[in-house]
Structure formats: C-alpha cells, structure tokens
Amino acid sequence: MDWYEVIRDLPSLAARSAGVAALGAVLGLDYIVIGQTLLAQPAISGPIVGIVLGEPMLGIWAGLTVQLLWAGRLPVGAYVPPNCCVAGVFTVGTAVLIPGVVAPAHRAVLAGLLTLPIAYAGGRLDVFIKARLNVIYLHAAERALAKNRRAPLGVATLKGVTSVFVKDYVLLWVSVFAATAVLGLVAGRITEQLGAGLNVAYVVLPAAGVALLLHAYWSWKTVSAFGAGAAAAGFALFIASVMVA
C-alpha cells in the first residue's frame, strides 16, 4: 500500500486495533490477576484472537510459536518475565490487521519481528504495577482499615485489576495500531526474494521454539514425552488428510 492509502485507512485501523486491545486486555487478566486458567497463554489466547478476527490458522501458528519461544520464561517468585499474553495477542492482531493483500505467512513473520519489544514493555509495566501502584493501593487500604471504613481491601483489589486491564489495553492499542500502519507500508514492497525468506522464517520460527523448549526442560523424560506427542499429532494429521481426500 502507498502512504496515502495507509493514511486513508487509519480510522479503520484504529477502530479494529481498539477491538483487539479490548479482547487482549480481557484475556490478559487471566495471566496473573484473575483465574489463571491458562486463557492468557499464547497457545490459547492466540487462537481465540484469530478466530474472532476470522483467521484461526494464523492465530494457531502465532499462538503456538510465541508459546514455544516463551516456554522457559515462567513468573516464579519475584521474577517477572516479558508478558507472553501481550506478545501473543499483539502478534495475531497485527498479522491479521496489516492492510493490503499480503500472504498470511508474510504477515505473521512481519508481526513476529516486532513482538519481543512489545512483550518486554508489557513485562516492565507489570513490574511497575506490582512494585508501585499495588503498594500505593495497599497503603490506602491500610489507612481505610484504621479508620474502620468498609471494604477497603475490595477497593484496593479492584484498583489493581483495573490497572492491569488499562495497561494491557493501552499497550496493545498503541502497539497494534502503530505496527499495522507501518507494516502496511512495508508489506506492499515485499520483493520475490524477501517473500521467499519470509516463507522460510515461517517454517523455521516454530522449529526454533521447539529447540528452546527442549533446551529449557532437557531430560530424556521430557524429550520422549514430546516425541510421543509429536508422533501422535503427526498420525492424527495423516488420518485427517486421508479422510478429507
């Protein structure tokens, strides 16, 4: 797309980015705030966003790839890793919303190239909320308890949840909107050679994620279990292809 076409499409991009951000912010509450039922994990949140946006296969690829790449980064103890939920939703949302007629594999890889800084920004904002805002809310609740006010802990909890929602919403809206606008200009200038490279990256990135996963949890038990699961999945895909044929 040319720059004037992207500018003409900015209001539509802004509205669609806001929808992606709202969905991502809701799913993001499940990351460390409410539930923790795995909805926020990219392997689940990515396909959900893809289904809502009408490209489930792209959502599955991006979600599973981001999940593999982040498999060794767990929020254990005081460690706050890059926000994998933000990473998954950003990748899928950006890949789907890139304007212009671009191959899904190219859109997925282009969006994936920008995922890491967005994920790290989400992680640093998580630290800020935990270390700063939540402390302020806690002290306010303590002062309210000292004055015998009602439900101060509930108010503090609600403020904390709202802070996380607003953080994810603003971060996703700004990042998805900016990324889709910029990549809309880039996507229209993909040469045949660059397109071939993006196709290779589309295949290699999940493999790199598998390698990182095995490296993070290396043991014969892990490798054998992963191999058995991969064999079962391959057999199921083979049976499905035979039945469809």
Image (cartoon, helix red, strand yellow):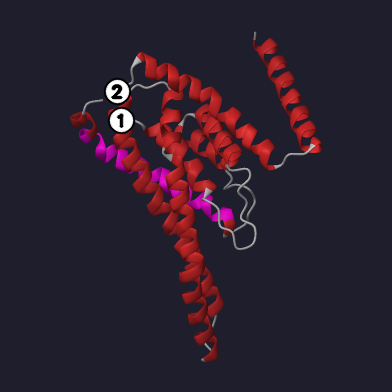
Rendered image quadrant of residue 239: top right
| Residue 58 screen position, x and y as percent | 50, 29
Is residue 32 at least partly visible in the picture? yes
In the image, residue 21 lies in the stretch drawn in magenta = yes
Label annotation for residue 154: none
Is residue 162 at least partly visible in the picture? no
Give me the residue at 55% from left, 38% from top.
66
Give me the residue at 63% from left, 54% from top.
36
- CB under 8 Å between discs 1 and 2: yes
In the image, residue 50 lies in the stretch drawn in magenta = no
Q: Where is the C terminus found, in terms of image quarters? A: top right
Rendered image quadrant of residue 189: top left
- The residue positioned farthest toward the left in the image shown: 4
Q: Which residues are magenta?
A: 7-31
Q: Main secondary structure of the magenta part?
A: helix
Q: Residues within 10 Å of mark 1 (few under 14, many from 20)?
A: many
Mark 2: amino acid = Gly
| Residue 183 screen position, x and y as percent | 33, 32
Q: Give the vertical position of 72 relative to 35 (above or below).
A: above
Which sits in the foreground, 180 or 152?
180
Give me the residue at 43% from left, 52% from top.
121
| Residue 21 screen position, x and y as percent | 42, 47
Label annotation for residue 184: 1
Q: Give the vertical position of 171 relative to 231 (above or below).
A: below
Position of 38 with respect to 24 (left or right) is right
Position of 8 with respect to 74 (left or right) is left
Give me the residue at 67% from left, 38% from top.
215
Label annotation for residue 188: 2
- The residue positioned farthest toward the top in the image shown: 245
Position of 45 with respect to 8 (left or right) is right
Q: Where is the N terminus found, in terms of image quarters? A: top left
Which sits in the foreground, 69 or 235?
69
